[in-house]
Amino acid sequence: MGRYVVERVKSGIPGFDDLIQGGFPKGTTVLVTGPTGSGKTTFAVQFAYKGAELYNEPAVIVTLEERAQDLRKEMATFGWDLERLEREKKIAIVDGVSAVVGLPSEEQYVLEGNLNTEDFLRYIYRVVKAINAKRLVIDSIPSIAFRLHDESRIREVLLQLNTILLEMGVASILTTEAPDPGRGKISRYGIEEYIARGVVLLDFVEKEVELKRYLLIRKMRETKHSMKKYPFEITEEGIVVYPSGEVY
Amino acid sequence: MGRYVVERVKSGIPGFDDLIQGGFPKGTTVLVTGPTGSGKTTFAVQFAYKGAELYNEPAVIVTLEERAQDLRKEMATFGWDLERLEREKKIAIVDGVSAVVGLPSEEQYVLEGNLNTEDFLRYIYRVVKAINAKRLVIDSIPSIAFRLHDESRIREVLLQLNTILLEMGVASILTTEAPDPGRGKISRYGIEEYIARGVVLLDFVEKEVELKRYLLIRKMRETKHSMKKYPFEITEEGIVVYPSGEVY
Amino acid sequence: MGRYVVERVKSGIPGFDDLIQGGFPKGTTVLVTGPTGSGKTTFAVQFAYKGAELYNEPAVIVTLEERAQDLRKEMATFGWDLERLEREKKIAIVDGVSAVVGLPSEEQYVLEGNLNTEDFLRYIYRVVKAINAKRLVIDSIPSIAFRLHDESRIREVLLQLNTILLEMGVASILTTEAPDPGRGKISRYGIEEYIARGVVLLDFVEKEVELKRYLLIRKMRETKHSMKKYPFEITEEGIVVYPSGEVY
Amino acid sequence: MGRYVVERVKSGIPGFDDLIQGGFPKGTTVLVTGPTGSGKTTFAVQFAYKGAELYNEPAVIVTLEERAQDLRKEMATFGWDLERLEREKKIAIVDGVSAVVGLPSEEQYVLEGNLNTEDFLRYIYRVVKAINAKRLVIDSIPSIAFRLHDESRIREVLLQLNTILLEMGVASILTTEAPDPGRGKISRYGIEEYIARGVVLLDFVEKEVELKRYLLIRKMRETKHSMKKYPFEITEEGIVVYPSGEVY
Amino acid sequence: MGRYVVERVKSGIPGFDDLIQGGFPKGTTVLVTGPTGSGKTTFAVQFAYKGAELYNEPAVIVTLEERAQDLRKEMATFGWDLERLEREKKIAIVDGVSAVVGLPSEEQYVLEGNLNTEDFLRYIYRVVKAINAKRLVIDSIPSIAFRLHDESRIREVLLQLNTILLEMGVASILTTEAPDPGRGKISRYGIEEYIARGVVLLDFVEKEVELKRYLLIRKMRETKHSMKKYPFEITEEGIVVYPSGEVY
Amino acid sequence: MGRYVVERVKSGIPGFDDLIQGGFPKGTTVLVTGPTGSGKTTFAVQFAYKGAELYNEPAVIVTLEERAQDLRKEMATFGWDLERLEREKKIAIVDGVSAVVGLPSEEQYVLEGNLNTEDFLRYIYRVVKAINAKRLVIDSIPSIAFRLHDESRIREVLLQLNTILLEMGVASILTTEAPDPGRGKISRYGIEEYIARGVVLLDFVEKEVELKRYLLIRKMRETKHSMKKYPFEITEEGIVVYPSGEVY
């Protein structure tokens, strides 16, 4: 057997793929983590949107913190027309909010209010198959835990997601909350980073009286990657990473 | 579809709108957080009062930490005549304290003593509709949790508030307590900042033996904003932010 | 309506009123907090004693950590003759200790051993009315919580106290314990400072090998106040604040 | 009424009384706290022993961490002959260990194995009366809590002890454990220091690679005291404080 | 009896054996710990693979965080052909994931979904015997705890593993998660490091804006070892340690 | 009564006795604490072995973390022939592991699998008497707690051990785990150091990128001792302390 060559999935984030040998390994579940306002949702949706638009890789977005319609509007500020790609069956957005807040939903893909782990995984599996998705975004893990009414099972759910998505060859991004990255707490439950096969931290560093954004790849299986803190910005076209920039 | 243009809501805080492209995005729920004495209530009421007075946008203020009459008196020290605007149906104050402390209330809008989440949301919805409010202030989230006798449901309540207010196009400010911002604890329950679509931190920095006030925008969806710490003061006319000032 | 002018209540602490526009706002509940030995009880009793003696404002002192007789003796070291003012109906001391430790009490005002929140509030209300008190001191909040056998209700009790006293126009001081002010823990339960309308921190700063006392006004509704750390001393006449002194 | 003059109780610790206007106030309960090996037991026993020997003030020592016979032997290393003073009815040692460890005791004063708060307080009261004691030492509070199988009642027990001893005019020292004085944790339960009328901290400061002992008076009711860290040593004659020494 | 000479087991990690007198002591259970992305799985598998390939010591790998097939693929990026060694009966991989995530497995060695401690230990024992293994890798301890649904028994399980493996003369590596090595938390449960006979920490140190990898041997029974932080890299051939390199 | 002269027990650790007036006080229970890999077991066994070999004081070693046979082998690396001294009835090793891990034991002294506090203490008492031991080692306290299935009783067990061993005149060493000595957590349960009559901390200090070993005597009853951090090494002959060395 010759040396195994890893298939790469383009992130769609300008500057980012240079840091990870050209893209995420196929089938890898990547955790995108950071404190509030760090750009996690933007990073995840950009990955899905650009995949569908530029690389013809359909993507499923499971939104558990805002409704599909609110997400579409928010992402339109970056000039991303999610609706068009949805019509072209290149994007499917699963509305995981309407039912739980008691509002009606006219979305095609809707998560019910009462949900157990198996239903959740099965539904995602079905939508992925429906558009033959190659990418998946779930925003966010704490919202899954909250929806399943059982935070103690989060390790099991993550392990299942991780394995099933790898089996399906779907590259996925899961987001989680990082209460205090500077003190080593880079995830809500302290276990997400161990289960995921890749971990990207979006965070801030204070320089004088200003917070500067940086990105750090903490882990990426099957990938030789730098461990540097790279500056990034949230521009009018979405996230841009500067591989040769300096944070400080 | 052309690039989506975000409608902006003037904050009524001098100097602040310059930091967020002219105002809050319409329908956005903004969390105003900080330790005790940081000016959260003043910020929130100023947003409601100035909206009603200067921009003809009626506002509902839900006060859960002091009675409506005490709030009116306190705000009068800034020369704000809430009562007049109430008579003009531009402001409605919901008294969320009298019932719980067992005092009679002669207010028009009163929250009952025993309240569940749905009653609470429904009541707010009704008052917003009654004066056709465009702005809403709830002071504070920990007091909601305390009133609902269930802190574990706070994530759900916030998600509901957030979504319903967005649906109604009402710009709202919710306040919460920040035990220790310097160590990353910028909210009472550690989740408020993730659910809200905008987060404004009011805090202090010690300079020699004096605490200096500063304001930091940690998150604002659909908005390009600076991440600098800006000095602000609580003057005799309310809060004033200095976008070109220096904290240190 | 012209600008509302806040009525001020003299603190009786030399140097202190200069920091808060001449005195506490009428009806305000002020939290006096600090670690052990910081002078909280002295501050609170001085406020009551001087109010009765100098400004003819009768005061009620609810003592929950030492018996009335022990408090009288202790305060006599400052030359304060509480007994005389009690005879003149200008001071009433409520003994909240004897019953709970199982000692007989010959005091006029005594709290029973088994007490619920409502009894407690009603009793205080009665004593305040009995001497037509304008000032109230409760020493301390943790002792109330301990007496009521329910720390979880402390938020509710404080909200009730706060509102009722404001309604009665009684200026009051409540004391609480601050385990670690330097790390943002400025109250026993982490909520007292949010409910109170004013917060005064008495603390120490280490200078070389000596602890220096300082006072910091963290919050004072309806009042423009400095946020500086002011040095103070506990002299033979009680607490004296030095508004122009330097802590370091 | 003239200014009240506080009666002073000599500590028996050379150098210490200079720091507290000549001695402890009569009837005061003083908490002696510190980490392991800081000299708490020595300080407390020296107070009892010297009181009985030099000032003719009988003392009761309640030993809950080692048996009376082990304490006697240990204290003999300082040349203190407890046994002689016991024969002279100037010292009574209450053995609070033998019963709980299941060893027979030939001591005159023995605490039973199963003990409730009231029995405990009543027994101490009886021994104090038996030798007409003016001083009392209880070593230590955590051991009381452990003996009473109820740490939650420790606040009540301390309040009772504090008040009853004050009533009896007995000056007492209670010891407790301070897990981390440098971070504000100066007592095992975080409440002992608030209940006691005096607090003396015995601690270490690291100077280069050596721990230096210091003593700090954090609180002393009815007493003007310095807040400096004073060096002390445990010599062959017991504890000696250096009021004019430097810790660093 | 002459001085006992310890039999050494080559680690297969270039540069590492120089630090521990030529290799791990025979039968020793070594804990490999570190935060996410520190190289724990690579270290452990390299130990197994190189043992089988270079030293003819068959190895069992129990994989509890990814399926056997995913592990094989990942390790192929280092040019390690696990499958070939499995065919030669030099490596056995126990798939501990498929059953728990509900996927079918075609592996020869599979852990069932519901498992108690004894079944788990017995199964491992059987596989070790089946290929006459001299090395064992279990990745990871938190996954065992999660599988056994009982974190409180983890101390017992580790003690059993440790002793039985020592009895069998099998050198083993167990991995665990280190939430915050810089603050002394070098294992998930805070006890793993005490039970294991050897502890190797893989961690990062931040140098300017880059994380640098280092390795520290915290414990190695029967072995004289340095306590220095050595730099290491994850190269295309696996982990390489630089005994003469500098971390800073 | 003349000044009491304390009988000293030689530690068997070169350089150590110089720090404590020639040796441990007779009958003293000493806690040896430190993080993993600090040398606690070596220190304790050296004390037992050297006592038996050099000073003709028989010793009992209760090993709760590894089997007697594993301990013997490990200690043989220091050239210590425990077996010979066992045959000469100068050493007795109590195997506290075999039963709990389910392995047969051919040892003479074996702790049963299910054990309560009284059985445990009684068994130790019996073995001590059997060889007329003057020294006792128990490795470790957390393992006792784990064996007794009741961590809450650890204070009681320690008090009993402490007192009974003092009564028997047996000098003993108990080991415990210190999670984070630098932050004041010098024992697993935070109480061991208060019960023991002596406390020796074995720890590391980081110097550049290397951990240096040091020893600190935190407490030693009846003994005048230095509070300096002394360097020590684990040599091929066991632990050696350098009383005149420098840690930094």
Image (tube, coloured by chain):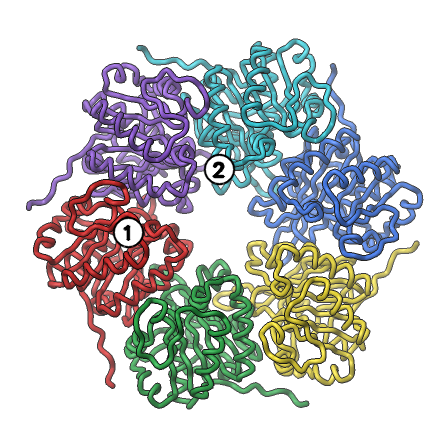
Chain colours: A yellow, B green, C red, D purple, E blue, F cyan
- Asked if labels 2 and 1 share a chain, the reply is no
Q: CA distance from mark 2 to mark 1?
A: 31 Å
- From the viewer's side, name the closer residue of D121 and F81: D121
Q: x and y percent of residue E12 in the render?
A: 80, 41
- What is the residue that sits farthest to the left in this orientation? D1
In the rendered view, tell whether residue A120 sits above or below residue C189: below
Q: Is residue B140 left or right of residue A51?
A: left
- Element at badge 1? strand
Say what amino acid the circle numbered 1 marks.
Arg
| Residue A143 appears in the picture as rendered | yes
In the rendered view, tell whether residue D211 sits above or below residue D45: below
Q: x and y percent of residue F67 in the render?
A: 69, 26
- From the viewer's side, name the closer residue of F60 and A233: F60
**Residue on which the image places disc 2:** F190
Question: Which mark, residue C213?
Answer: 1
Screen quadrant of the C terminus of chain A: bottom right
